[in-house]
Amino acid sequence: MMGDRSGFGGIGGTGNAGGLDELNDLYEAIILDHYRSPRNTAPVDSPDIDLEVNNPFCGDEFHIQLKVDGDTVSQVGITGRGCAISQASASLLAELVEGKTSSEVRAAVSAFRRLLKGEEVSDEEMEKLGDIEALSGVRKFPVRIKCALLSWVGLGDALEEHLAK
Ligand code: ZN
């Protein structure tokens, strides 16, 4: 099976095609794992933020609940259905934001958005995104960027709105 390697210039930086395939396998494993066993799906008791987001182009729908303690997301619950990318992305988000301050969440949403659009993301930002790097391949499929960003933008905007009250 030959993958299209031409779009991967720069990733890994070794020029080693074998390593690249391993990286792709790793990314795929992370995405499938989150798709099959989504994190933080338990409903949140009396949530401070409760919203539904959907992407009608793909049929992705998520229910996002957050408990906010001062400036920190103390509890998160995200459930929903949709394509594998949207579900894996929502699960990675649910895992990431728990215990984070609003500015950390804002920074993560900004970095993730840039990652998907193929824009500059610093090494420090990549480190904070961690496993979320697995979704970087989505940038090759513009129609899927909406799927990946759906829960992130919804959660980020709702958190800003909540804190502005
Ligand atoms: Zn989708």
Image: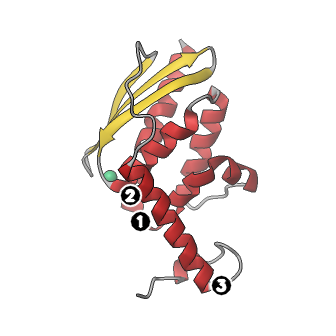
The quarter of the displayed image where residue 164 is located: top right
Asked whether mark 2 lies closer than 8 Å to ligand 1, one says yes
Calculate the distance from the C-alpha at mark 3 to the C-alpha at mark 1. Answer: 24 Å
The secondary element bearing badge 2 is classed as helix
Total numbered labels: 3
Residue located beneath label 2 in the image: 144
| Residue in view at x 50 percent, y 71 percent | 25
| Classed neighbour count for the residue bearing mark 3: other residues with Cα under 10 Å, few (<14), some (14–19), many (≥20) | few
Residue located beneath label 3 in the image: 16
Please state which amino acid type lies under the numbered disc 2: Arg
Q: Nearer the viewer, mark 3 or mark 1?
A: 3
Calculate the distance from the C-alpha at mark 1 to the C-alpha at mark 2. Answer: 6 Å
Residue 114 left/right relative to 142: right
The secondary element bearing badge 1 is classed as loop
Residue 59 location (% of width, % of height): 24, 47
The secondary element bearing badge 3 is classed as loop
The quarter of the displayed image where residue 2 is located: bottom left
| Residue in view at x 31 percent, y 38 percent | 80
Residue 58 left/right relative to 65: left
Residue 154 location (% of width, % of height): 43, 34
Please state which amino acid type lies under the numbered disc 3: Asn
Dot placed on the residue nearer the N-terminal end, 3 or 1? 3
Instruction: Locate the N terminus and report the quarter of the image it occupies.
Output: bottom left
Q: Nearer the viewer, residue 102 or 65?
A: 65
Q: Is residue 149 visible?
A: no
Calculate the distance from the C-alpha at mark 3 to the C-alpha at mark 2. Answer: 27 Å
| Residue in view at x 43 percent, y 43 percent | 90
Please state which amino acid type lies under the numbered disc 1: Phe
CB under 8 Å between discs 1 and 2: yes
Relative to 152, say whether 32 is above or below: below
| Classed neighbour count for the residue bearing mark 1: other residues with Cα under 10 Å, few (<14), some (14–19), many (≥20) | few
